[in-house]
Amino acid sequence: MFQFVNVVKMKIIFKLLILVLCFGFSTKTQAQSIIEWSKDYKLKWSDFKAEADTTILAFANTVYKIEILPTNVAVDSNNHIQNYEALTAVAQFYAKLSWVYEEDDNLLKHEQLHFDIAELYARKLRLEFEKLKQEKNANFNAYSAAYNKLWAECKALQMKYDSETNHGIFIEENQKWENDILNKLNSIKSIH
């Protein structure tokens, strides 16, 4: 007998399903609304499709997520993920939730680096998943713990990045961060 992951995962899946239904995604629309990180694609201001939120003291907002795929995993009564070998993680940019108030080339680099940081942690998560798979570990809690740990680290680094660059205003500091993150991305072999 199989049970779907847990209530939290079910709520996340349900919210994503509602999001998908609300935006009426077709394959083409989805490709335009959710952008998966790629070394060959850099964000453009035209990717930021939401209306600017003028109540927030910011010139742009990048909405991203590290998505675990497949999203509809099943867990048996022993808390083992069925087909755990297929689990992976991807960094995604949500165009219809991201916005820009004032376009600037340096600000766009800053927003791109937020997405790059998400990819860095998606790669770290894929590596953790690969370790668990090599151990033939199918336990849901092991994968969930890896995700929660790395997601918390990702959020903390994103906040530190904004703090140290003053949300991209300090251009030289932003360039240092860009070099550091790109070096880290290059040092981690991308598993997909």
Image (tube, rainbow, N blue to C red):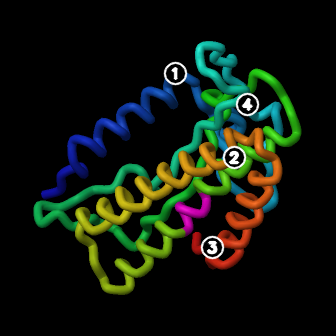
- Bin the neighbour count of mark 1 within 10 Å (Cα to Cα): few under 14, some 14-19, many 20 and up: few
Which residue bears the numbered disc 4?
A: 48
Instruction: Identify the mark nearer the N-term, 1 or 3.
Output: 1
Amino acid at circle 1: Cys
Numbered mark located on residue 22 in the image: 1
Region rendered in magenta: 119-123
Mark 1 or mark 4, whichever is nearer to me: 4
Residue in the image at 70% along x and 30% along y: 60
Numbered mark located on residue 190 in the image: 3
- Bin the neighbour count of mark 2 within 10 Å (Cα to Cα): few under 14, some 14-19, many 20 and up: some
Looking at this view, is 150 or 90 the one in front?
150
Whole-Å distance between the Cαs marked 4 and 3?
Answer: 26 Å
Dot 3: what SS? loop
Dot 4: what SS? loop
* 45 displayed left or right of 135: right
Instruction: Identify the mark nearer the N-term, 1 or 4.
Output: 1
Whether residue 59 is situated above or below residue 172 in the rendered picture: above
Mark 2 or mark 3, whichever is nearer to me: 2
Mark 2 or mark 4, whichever is nearer to me: 2
Amino acid at circle 3: Ser
Picture quarter containing residue 81?
Answer: bottom left
